[in-house]
Image (cartoon, grey):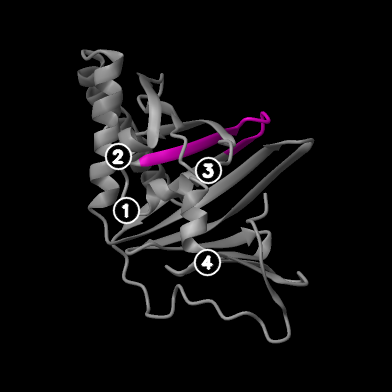
Amino acid sequence: MQTFRVRFIFSVLKGGLLQAALFAAAGTLLAQSPQQLATKTAAAVDAHYNSLHSLRTGFTETYDGLGIRRTERGTLLLAKPGKMKWVYSEPKGKLFVLDGKWAWFWSVGAGQVQRMSAARLDDLRSPLRFLLGHTQLEKELTGLTAHTAADGLIELSGKPRQYSTGQPNAIAAIRLRVTADGTIHQLEVEQVDGSLTRFDFDHEEPNVKFGDNEFKFTPPAGVPVVDAMPPI
């Protein structure tokens, strides 16, 4: 919250100018067909994230399904090639690390550390792969559609392609809310059982320099490591 009134006024003006810019960009895109808008928006997302070496952003994760509703928050770190770290502040002590070879799942107080190979996580067609810096949305999603929302953001949606795993696709649809330049503000995953998981991102910081051990995870002493599927 701004402390001084002048800073508050500046913030409002700045927000208004940003909103105007979003509407202007969206207006240009509106002259295109829905398919052209989807194609151009997908390409903008690809170009934005594929150009980054690393990224830090705040996130709010909301899950609603199977009689459960919960909201969690934290910070997401990404780095090429294929490294990712979710540090949760709510609940504190929850951690997910993808070190390029293994994905690790750990919560303080849990009786075990869950681990799975990075290749297996990728095979799950996790929507988080869209932020790993090798995106190709038109190859990942079928039936891409797009429209411009009232707030000027573009809503892009599609269904993950079925890979030759022999397993049914558990994801029914993926929806993204992005700016015209391809920055993702929200990612929503709808599963075939009707459950929804939504990620809202804020304060994106591109090309952050991380330490060599930022994505290294060492299981706590005495805690067993089990190979398992990631938890809901």
Q: Nearer the viewer, mark 3 or mark 4?
A: 4
Q: Residues within 10 Å of mark 2 (few under 14, many from 20)?
A: many
Q: Earlier in the sequence, mark 2 or mark 4?
A: 2
- Whole-angstrom CA distance, mark 2 to mark 4, is 24 Å
Q: Nearer the viewer, mark 1 or mark 3?
A: 1
Q: Main secondary structure of the magenta part?
A: strand
Q: What residue is disc 3 on?
A: 199
Residue 71: % across, % down: 66, 46
**Which residue is at 32% across, 29% downward?**
19
Task: Tell me if 120 is positioned left or right of 139 in this view.
Answer: right
Q: What residue is disc 4 on?
A: 97
In the rendered image of this protein, does residue 151 appear above or below residue 212? above
SS assignment at label 4? strand
In the rendered image of this protein, does residue 36 appear above or below residue 194? above
Task: Tell me if 185 is positioned left or right of 165 in this view.
Answer: left
Occupied quadrant, residue 23: top left
**Which residue is at 36% across, 73% downward?**
210
Amino acid type at image mark 4: Val
Q: Residues within 10 Å of mark 3 (few under 14, many from 20)?
A: many
Amino acid type at image mark 2: Val
Q: What residue is disc 1 on?
A: 133
SS assignment at label 3? strand
Amino acid type at image mark 1: Gly
**Which residue is at 54% across, 76% downward?**
217
For the magenta stretch, what is the residue range?
Answer: 184-197
